[in-house]
Amino acid sequence: MTRLNGEDEVAELCRDLIRIDSTNAGDNTGPGERAAAEYVAGRLAEVGLEPLILESDSRRANVVVRVEGTDPSREALLLHGHLDVVPFDAADWTVHPLSGEVADGCVWGRGAVDMKNMDAMILAVVRQRLSEGRRPPRDVVLAFTADEEAGGRYGAHWLAAEHKDLFDGCTEAIGEVGGFSVTLDGARRLYLIEAAEKGIAWMRLTATGRAGHGSMLNAENAVTELAEAVGRVGRHEWPVRLTRTVETFLTETSRALGLEFDPDDPEATVAKLGPLARMIGATLRNTANPTMLEAGYKANVIPQTATAYVDGRFLPGYEEEFLQTLDELLGPNVTREFIYHDVAMETGFDGSLARAVTEALLAEDPGALAVPYTLSGGTDLKAFSVLGLRGFGFAPLRLPADLDFSGMFHGVDERVPVDSLRFGVRVLDRFLDGC
Ligand SMILES: [Zn+2]
């Protein structure tokens, strides 16, 4: 087999993936992930693997394959990346989002940040290792999933429910969102490792009252009842709840920045974090934001029911408190039901997996400081955690100081530096040997 160089081909793999349209509007229309899955499976087959393409629905394709390790007695590691991307409005972009153009030292396009960059890095490192006959110490299961951007019903959740056996022996997982650097000064960079995720509770609220003529007295108006409840939810000031991962993040980051960290007032520290404040601030408390309203059909008719939608996010360990508070705010006349509900999770940044992450980063960047953080959103890891896996968001990228990377997730002009991709391949290669 010809030897392949992962660093040399990673940008091309990323560009190829960006050029394959796999946008996911969330309603099971659109191109699906089939073409991207075939591309990935083809690149894996070239180095002797026999990947499965698993369709959960027409064109909703996932790829899974196991790379055998040298020590079969060890538990397996899952490396996972999603193949879908969120939609875009091309008019807003400097280059076409499906161009995969390489300019100014970066690969540009939808997915360059979330997460065809990591898909390409996984492909590059596995292809290089197998072409050189270097198997990883432990079995590594690769999963390239559909539908992450809409909650994983056709992807990770479906795989975990219908194809559990493919993940036999897997105890740990590596995926998004983390591993990218935030520059502290010329010599030091924070690498944010995702070690916890908030849970998701999207809810429909319904108020039921008495329908009637808009000119009459009506003390049971569903619109009034709902509007008051929505107002209470939206205005509620959720208390700060300092979870283990957030406390570790703030302690270590404060120390690195020479700031004082007062656990009784974490907001004061978060406020000093610059561009990270938005991302970290959302992990200090539960949140519930009203997002949609629906009621009525004519100005002089009081409708029988009124509905609203709320995007709720709860911290690991605080789901019960979240739902209890919400019920108090809604009152007796408004009911709630989940339209989407997924778990919160938290795993300590400890053990051999954390050590392998830290050592691989330090070997390639002596100024690296790996710190665990909590993601305010969700990833496929939620679905795999149901199978009993623990894991981190770790897609390693050393980034230039002035690149607002976290701002480019789902954003305009997504781009990733080629040098950062090359760095990621080297780090992942070391990580596979060390984990
Ligand atoms: Zn993603």
Image (tube, helix red, strand yellow):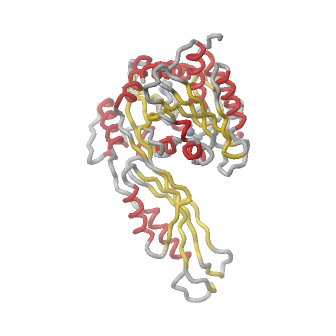
Q: Image quadrant of ligand 1?
A: top right
Which residue occupies 52% across, 18% down?
Answer: 135
Whether residue 102 appears in this view of the structure is: no
| Front-most of residues 271 and 79 | 79
**Which part of the image, by quadrant, shows the N terminus?**
top right
| Front-most of residues 410 and 197 | 197
Q: In the displayed structure, would residue 132 be above or below residue 320?
A: above
Q: Is residue 30 left or right of residue 180?
A: right
Q: In the displayed structure, would residue 288 be above or below residue 109?
A: below
Q: Is residue 308 left or right of residue 98?
A: left
Which residue occupies 53% across, 76% down?
Answer: 224
Please identify the residue farthest to the front as the structure is shown: 73
Q: In the displayed structure, would residue 284 be above or below residue 107?
A: below
| Front-most of residues 51 and 154 | 51
Query: In the rendered image, which quarter is residue 39 located in?
Result: top right
Please identify the residue farthest to the bottom as the structure is shown: 216
Whether residue 203 appears in this view of the structure is: yes
Query: In the rendered image, which quarter is residue 127 located in?
Result: top right
- Residue 231, percent across and down? 47, 67
Q: In the displayed structure, would residue 95 be above or below residue 219?
A: above
- Residue 241, percent across and down? 33, 51
Query: In the rendered image, which quarter is residue 88 located in?
Result: top right
- Residue 24, percent across and down? 66, 44
**Which part of the image, by quadrant, shows the C terminus?**
top left
Which residue occupies 41% across, 46% down?
Answer: 281
